């Protein structure tokens, strides 16, 4: 009887823990949903509304993207240390409030451009102010994302790798859904508003402003509930460190990243940002130039999101448990998916070479449809690799340095975005797009090679763990 009661208590405790985890997970999912939807809508609105204010030039959009990414490259290794040293709840609340405040101020400045007329010189002053406000806003978006995904989520999952896989997969599904739904909703609203640029800018900026202002408090409440419901977030203390010169912190962050065995895997991930082979502005503009219809281009964005969701859904299945253990280990999933992404892009190189050698054999429209098909469908492999690398960083980087490592990885990603945009400025003519295409495929090949080297050296956790004490002490060359 006593044994039965004891088993009943243990079962009740297990059920209670499972219920608590479900509640905590729901709060995390809601936080991600609110944040991702607002971020995606704002990112989509910027180039659209900029074109309404400056209809004859792409310069504001290009400058905004380049300056923002350069700033993130410089600042993220410094900001990553905040995740390692500052109190968890305070950091999350500050990032949410300041991020939303920056978006609100940017929307007000954008609204103010409608009083000056299109392309007025005063609007360039307002553009500089928007950019100045956007830098700290984007910085804190990145810090908040690292804190939630690389710090809070692993702590909530504790040592349960299966739970961590589930959380990562569902967060990615939410992000990909918002990536599709956010721009679509905002696009429908702008279409309904008509063609008057003043009306579009005023109402568009007002909608984004209201969303961020209204959702600030629910976000803060959700992260507070997660913090209160998860004892590990309160009991796992971070090492307090003396404040340093930010440039010393910048240098130390890069040195720590360089010595860490995860560096090659992170470099592999970052190289994938050197690409035009994604449903972005450069690729869509080129495909429109070769004759692909706008309706097909619009549908491809939605289908690409579905393929991404398929990858996020497949990731936990690949990691699923069997009687013999895991179906595939994280390093194996990463290696398999990154090479599959590269192989999926090879036909694009083939058709572009054929087009250059024998222009008559392959029409521009047919080539455009082939490129679009392989880019969109292949994104399943891309997002599987994204999830695998993300969880490797969560599981194989210690809690006290995870923020700095993640910050350095984010900085490298931003650097490669700048590289591809710079190449886009140099090879800006549509008939030169093949240069950007070849560069993108080469970057994926380098990514696959980099991850393969990491896989050969560090796929075994025992070998990986042996190198970590040297990393922390700074003795690794």
Image: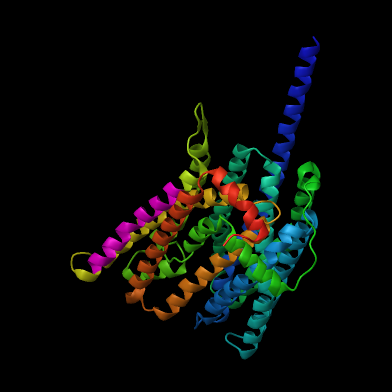
Residue 284 locus on image (x, y percent): 42, 66
Q: Nearer the viewer, residue 7 or 118?
A: 7
Q: Nearer the viewer, residue 40 or 406?
A: 406
Residue 116 seen anywhere in this rendered image of the structure: no
The answer to which image quadrant residue 43 occupies is bottom right
Left/right of residue 367 with respect to residue 31 in the rendered view: left
Q: Residue at x 49, y 28 (%)?
A: 324
Q: Name the outermost residue toward the front.
A: 475
Residue range in magenta is 335-355
Q: Residue at x 71, y 37 (%)?
A: 21
Residue 187 locus on image (x, y percent): 54, 63
Residue 214 locus on image (x, y percent): 75, 59
The magenta stretch spans residue 337: yes
Quadrant in the picture for the C terminus = bottom right
Q: Residue at x 62, y 70 (%)?
A: 72
Left/right of residue 63 with respect to residue 300 in the rendered view: right
The answer to which image quadrant residue 348 occupies is bottom left
Q: Tell me, what colour scheme is on the image?
A: rainbow
Examine the rendered structure and indicate whether residue 467 appears above or below residue 294.
above
Examine the rendered structure and indicate whether residue 448 appears above or below residue 362.
above
Examine the rendered structure and indicate whether residue 466 appears above or below residue 15.
below
Q: Nearer the viewer, residue 77 or 12?
A: 77
Left/right of residue 284 with respect to residue 135 in the rendered view: left
Q: Residue at x 79, y 15 (%)?
A: 5
Examine the rendered structure and indicate whether residue 345 appears above or below residue 43.
above
The answer to which image quadrant residue 114 occupies is bottom right
Q: Nearer the viewer, residue 56 or 361?
A: 361
Quadrant in the picture for the N terminus = top right
The magenta stretch spans residue 336: yes
Residue 293 seen anywhere in this rendered image of the structure: yes
Predominant SS along the magenta part: helix
Residue 268 locus on image (x, y percent): 48, 58
């Amino acid at each position: 009887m006593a044994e039965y009661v004891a088993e009943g208590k243990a079962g009740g405790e297990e059920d209670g823990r499972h219920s608590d985890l479900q509640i905590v997970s729901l709060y995390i999912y809601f936080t991600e949903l609110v944040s991702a939807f607002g971020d995606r809508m704002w990112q989509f609105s910027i180039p659209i509304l900029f074109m309404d204010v400056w209809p004859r030039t792409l310069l504001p959009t290009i400058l905004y993207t380049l300056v923002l990414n350069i700033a993130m490259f410089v600042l993220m290794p410094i900001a990553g240390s905040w995740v390692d040293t500052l109190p968890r709840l305070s950091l999350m609340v500050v990032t949410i409030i300041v991020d939303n405040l920056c978006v609100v101020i940017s929307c007000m400045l954008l609204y103010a451009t409608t009083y000056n007329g299109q392309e007025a010189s005063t609007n360039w002053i307002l553009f500089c102010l928007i950019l100045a406000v956007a830098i700290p806003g984007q910085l804190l978006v990145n810090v908040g994302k690292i804190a939630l995904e690389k710090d809070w989520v692993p702590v909530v999952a504790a040592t349960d790798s299966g739970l961590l896989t589930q959380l990562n997969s569902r967060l990615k599904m939410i992000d990909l859904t918002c990536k599709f739904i956010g721009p679509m909703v905002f696009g429908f609203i702008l279409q309904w508003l008509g063609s008057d640029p003043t009306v579009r800018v005023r109402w568009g900026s007002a909608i984004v402003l209201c969303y961020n202002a209204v959702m600030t408090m629910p976000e803060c409440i959700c992260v507070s509930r997660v913090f209160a419901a998860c004892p590990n977030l309160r009991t796992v203390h971070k090492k307090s460190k003396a404040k340093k010169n930010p440039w010393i912190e910048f240098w130390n962050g890069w040195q720590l990243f360089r010595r860490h065995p995860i560096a090659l895997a992170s470099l592999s991930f970052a190289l994938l940002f050197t690409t035009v082979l994604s449903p972005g502005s450069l690729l869509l503009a080129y495909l429109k130039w070769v004759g692909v219809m706008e309706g097909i281009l619009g549908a491809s964005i939605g289908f690409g999101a579905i393929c991404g969701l398929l990858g996020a859904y497949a990731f936990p299945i690949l990691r699923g448990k069997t009687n013999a253990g895991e179906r595939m280990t994280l390093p194996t999933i990463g290696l398999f998916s990154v090479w599959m992404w590269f192989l999926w892009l090879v036909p694009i190189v083939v058709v572009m070479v054929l087009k250059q050698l024998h222009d008559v054999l392959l029409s521009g429209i047919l080539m455009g449809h082939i490129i679009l098909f392989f880019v969109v469908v292949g994104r399943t492999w891309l997002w599987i690799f994204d999830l695998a690398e993300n969880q490797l960083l969560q599981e194989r980087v210690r809690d006290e340095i995870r923020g700095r490592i993640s910050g350095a990885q984010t900085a490298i990603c931003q650097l490669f975005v700048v590289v591809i945009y710079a190449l886009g400025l140099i090879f800006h003519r549509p008939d030169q797009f093949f240069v950007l295409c070849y560069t993108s495929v080469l970057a994926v090949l380098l990514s696959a090679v980099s991850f393969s080297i990491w896989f050969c050296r560090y796929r075994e956790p025992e070998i990986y763990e042996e190198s970590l004490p040297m990393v922390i002490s700074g003795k690794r060359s």
